[in-house]
Image (tube, helix red, strand yellow):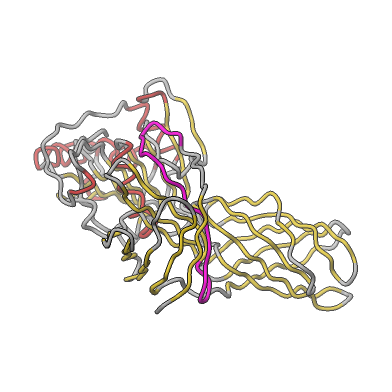
Amino acid sequence: MLQRTFYRAGALAAAVVLVIGLAIIAGYADKMHPELDVPYEPTHPAVIKAMLRLANVGKGDVVYDLGCGDGRIVVTALAEFGAARAVGIDLNPQRLKEAEERAKGTGVFDKVRYVQGNIMEVDASPANVVTMYLLDSVNLMVRPKLFQELAPGSRCVAHAFHMHDWKQDKIIQHPKARNNRISFWIIPAHLGGKWKWTTATASGKIENILSLNQTFQVVDGTIATDGRPSGSIQNPYVSGKEFSFSANIHAKGQAVRVNYKGIAEGNTIRGTQEWSNGQKYVWVAKHISQSPQGKWELNVAGPVNLSGKLSLQRKGRKIQATYFVKSEGREAPLKDVYIWGSSVYFRIPMYGRERLAVFKGTLEGNSGNGKMAVITYSEEGPFDFNYAYSWTASKIQ
């Protein structure tokens, strides 16, 4: 369902699918409570089914439809995909009345709940699948909420529009879709920082430390094994909680190539490691990095004078962050901010709303470092930013 307005979501205690409607919001960056003033546009039934298939909606899922309009997406999820329950969210009471009638007529009314409200003011943490039909600008506004509130492994589907530099895990073409495009993402596990494990081999125990940098589902890093200098990992792959990579290591004087594959749950990765010499071992890694919460002094190298003070605090799943730009004497609230372990990403508006400074890097212990790009915001891309500047950080509180 394409709903050109802005929404409030309800929350469920089960797995949830979010279906977010399209919004047109003048001055969206400055308005936290946009008005309901634009009519919705229904999504073609074939596109609804394609979105729900891509989200792998099925038994046990709860469909969470924000901007549900006349309720056709939640009804389809319940009646044709076997979802356990559904919630439809919309600001328009007339659309919700139509949605209730549709659910009654299809025989799924006992499995659906409708909520009138605004998505940005309601906790969406029970969601495990997100489907969206939003403007690109509204996708970008909703994006940090999804990362803060949804658990790793939650699936996200967008009709037509993108998520800026959060690149799609998959794109399919559909002739009935706007722009012929449906995009798919999975909320990645929090992998940034250091991981430690011991491998018990016939030649003795081998200590390993893996250091990872993360930006959305993209990771890179190094591995240090058996007290030897670190070497880069190869072929890192993240899909929700699934994480794999390969590395060339030296173990007890032997050069071995190892393929690691596991599932990340909180501060633990559990899986297997397959060695090129034919050995196979259990892989259980523990996250040993500290949280980057607190206050940091950042020094930015380059012609753009954006050195300042960063404050990061987590309130439950929510991240509260500000950045004080020294040269301008201003403190800016950060709305587009992310923490993955000890990896961070945030954006600072500069020189008006069309220009942004994009920071990514690591805050580990009492120090940190990373890269910065200066971009002119465009909904049409490109999204491969030139991180031309570097920054260092020291913890001050």
Q: Quadrant of the N terminus?
A: top left
**Magenta span contains residue 376:** yes
Query: Residue 390 at x, y = what percent?
Result: 52, 56
The one of 127 and 275 positioned closer to us in this rendering: 275
**Can residue 258 be found in the magenta stretch?**
no
Using the image, determine if residue 1 lies above or below residue 29.
above
* Residue most extreme to the top: 175
Name the residue at 88% across, 72% down: 252
Q: Is residue 109 above or below residue 378?
A: below
* Residue found at x 23% / y 53%: 120
Left or right, 226 with reference to 72 = right
Residue under the image location 20 percent in, 44 percent down: 6
| Image quarter (top left, top right, bottom left or bottom right) of the C terminus | bottom left
* Number of marks in picture: 0
Q: Residue at x 21, y 57 (%)?
A: 121
Residue 59 at what x, y percent from top left? 42, 49
Range shown magenta: 363-382
Along the line of sight, the residue nearer the viewer: 346 or 103: 346
**Residue 16 located left or right of residue 248:** left
Where does residue 164 sit, x and y in percent of width and height? 41, 40
Name the magenta segment's main secondary structure: strand
